[in-house]
């Protein structure tokens, strides 16, 4: 069975297929719209285009999996999205009549984390993008919590920050390690230019904050490993800070990777198939 997968980030949306070996890379890459209505139109268009593409190749589409940047409740509704204007969007309900296929929506970091685990291990996942997301997977199942928001490490307090967070609290990891916080402190074009020593120190501070939050996750969840993902993991100054992380369990490893599409594709495919199987 083929699954249409759509990974929505705060700035970029990637769409493609799960279960179709000839299409492992994104088939469509779009800028994420700014408004809720524009986002719903984009999701409808991508769904129609990809379902039509699959059916033209005689592939049956069993469902559509959508990863969303924010807190998605257990009914598939995007309750809050601090770095976008999509809060309150109910993808599963509002797109139910699109392409005559079932939809399943979840937090983007949840989907990526589900695509990251192997075997029966416990994994803590930290996603670095425009915001900071996170999730916990235990033996192949997401740890959901009472409201479906477990693992949101971006809103764990860290010692280096007292800044106000988009979530309404102060001192969250998001305020020092998110892409939006780095653009605020270093400028919009910081990624493309050589940084000053002070600016490199700011990157190292972000890395140390991620290491601190990772240590908290390790203490609370006793994982086999912690995975940190995002383009920020390719920056030397940032990784200098991350490598200072300390943890209570000596057999817990911390790993980093830049690209998240493969993880999102795998995780959204798993979520969609599980939903189809009931």
Image (cartoon, helix red, strand yellow):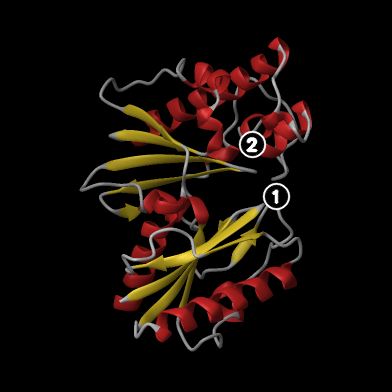
- Which numbered disc covers residue 178? 2
Q: CA distance from mark 2 to mark 1?
A: 10 Å
Helix, strand or loop at disc 1?
A: loop
Q: Residues within 10 Å of mark 2 (few under 14, many from 20)?
A: many
x and y percentages locating residue 116 in the rendered image:
35, 47
Task: Quadrant for residue 238, please give it.
Answer: top right
> Looking at the image, which is closer to me, 146 or 253?
253
Q: Quadrant of the N terminus?
A: bottom left
- Which numbered disc covers residue 235? none
Q: Quadrant of the C terminus?
A: bottom left
Residue 234, relative to residue 199: is it above or below?
below
x and y percentages locating residue 103 in the rendered image:
48, 76
- Residue at the image point whose x is 39% and y is 65% from the top: 23
- Which numbered disc covers residue 83? 1
Q: Is residue 130 visible?
A: yes
Task: Quadrant for residue 195, please give it.
Answer: top right
Q: Is residue 170 visible?
A: no
Q: Earlier in the sequence, mark 2 or mark 1?
A: 1
Residue 22, relative to residue 130: is it above or below?
below
Helix, strand or loop at disc 2?
A: loop
- Residue at the image point whose x is 52% and y is 69% from the top: 76
Q: Is residue 267 left or right of residue 86?
A: left
Residue 13, relative to residue 43: is it above or below?
above
Q: Are marks 2 and 1 in contact (CB under 8 Å)?
A: yes
- Residue at the image point whose x is 74% and y is 73% from the top: 37
> Looking at the image, which is closer to me, 11 or 67?
11
> Looking at the image, which is closer to me, 235 or 111?
235
């Amino acid at each position: 069975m083929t699954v249409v997968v759509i990974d929505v980030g705060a700035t970029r949306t990637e769409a493609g297929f799960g279960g179709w070996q000839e299409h492992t890379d994104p088939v469509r890459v779009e800028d994420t719209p700014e408004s809720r209505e524009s986002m719903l139109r984009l999701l409808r268009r991508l769904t129609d285009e990809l379902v039509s593409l699959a059916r033209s190749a005689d592939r049956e589409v069993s469902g559509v999996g959508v990863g969303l940047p924010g807190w998605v409740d257990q009914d598939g509704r995007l309750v809050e999205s601090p770095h976008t204007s999509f809060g309150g969007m109910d993808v599963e309900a509002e797109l139910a009549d699109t392409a005559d296929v079932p939809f399943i929506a979840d937090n983007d970091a949840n989907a990526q984390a589900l695509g990251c685990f192997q075997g029966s291990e416990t994994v803590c996942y930290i996603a670095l993008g425009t915001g900071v997301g996170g999730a916990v997977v235990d033996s192949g199942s997401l740890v959901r919590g009472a409201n479906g928001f477990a693992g949101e490490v971006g809103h764990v307090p860290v010692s280096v920050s007292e800044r106000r967070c988009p979530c309404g609290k102060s001192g969250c990891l998001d305020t020092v390690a998110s892409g939006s916080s780095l653009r605020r402190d270093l400028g919009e074009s910081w990624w493309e230019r050589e940084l000053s020593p002070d600016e490199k120190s700011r990157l190292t501070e972000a890395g140390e904050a991620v290491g601190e939050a990772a240590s908290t996750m390790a203490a609370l969840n006793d994982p086999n490993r912690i995975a940190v993902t995002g383009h920020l993991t390719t920056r030397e100054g940032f990784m200098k800070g991350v490598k200072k992380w300390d943890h209570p369990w000596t057999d817990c490893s911390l790993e980093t990777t830049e690209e998240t599409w493969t993880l999102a594709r795998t995780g959204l495919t798993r979520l969609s198939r599980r939903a189809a199987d009931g």
